[in-house]
Amino acid sequence: MPRFFMSSHISSTTCSAAILFVLILTLIGCRAAPEPAPHSPTPGRPPDARLSNGYSLLYDLVNKERNVDKLLWLKSAPDDLAKLVKSLAATSSEATRKITAFAERDPMLKLDRLDLPPMEQATRTAIESSTRKRLLLTGDHFATLLALKQVEAAEYGLHLAQLLSQADEDVSRRQWLEQFADAYRDTRDRLIDWLATGRALPD
């Protein structure tokens, strides 16, 4: 604490008040922020709203990704890329059934709680519409665009599942989320490897 040099004409009362004021400021400045109380769930307590929001987001993703291989009915892609796309679709299809089963067993777990801000929802809708048109109308770049979009989806899905596994107290759901994240990560890595081999057409 810096030293304060006081003139002799300052009264002892003023000195005492000044010192007390400095001490209070020091204590306030050095006081550590209180740590949050540990989370202790109460039996029968409804799950954190974040869980319904997280599972709703994950369900929304996999429910769309499970049909991505249908694009291969209309457009052609290299066999190795088609295999990866079908793998991601199969993983997503199984995840759709699994999450639905979770919600059926736990009535407090809702799958319609996206809770996105209106502008975020509008932006997502616009991106999905634009991507769908580009995938259907593009020619030689179809494979590259498809692979890039699946990398984005897998990246989002695996991180969302990881965060959910940290927040969910249900052991069986947490284990499944970790397995799902691993499967999406593996497909993401393989898609990136495919893009890096030079077989993807340049823009």
Image (spheres, rainbow, N blue to C red):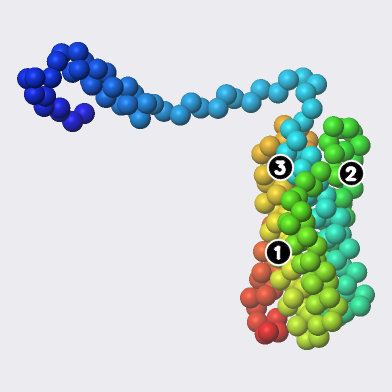
Q: Quadrant of residue 30?
A: top left
Question: The residue tagged with tag 2: helix, strand or loop?
Answer: helix
- Per the image, the residue denoted by label 3 is 164
- Per the image, the residue denoted by label 2 is 100
Q: Quadrant of residue 175?
A: top right
Which residue in the rendered view is the most extreme toward the left? 8
Q: Is residue 143 above or below residue 11?
A: below
Q: CA distance from mark 3 to mark 2?
A: 16 Å
Pointers 2 and 1 in contact (C-beta within 8 Å): no
Q: Quadrant of residue 50?
A: top right
Q: Is residue 97 above or below residue 5?
A: below
Query: In the displayed structure, does residue 3 sit left or right of residue 31?
Result: left
Query: In the displayed structure, does residue 36 sit left or right of residue 47?
Result: left
Where in the figure is residue 6, as x and y percent of width and height? Answer: 11, 24
- Per the image, the residue denoted by label 1 is 152
Question: The residue tagged with tag 1: helix, strand or loop?
Answer: helix
Name the quadrant of the C terminus: bottom right
Q: Residues within 10 Å of mark 1 (few under 14, many from 20)?
A: few
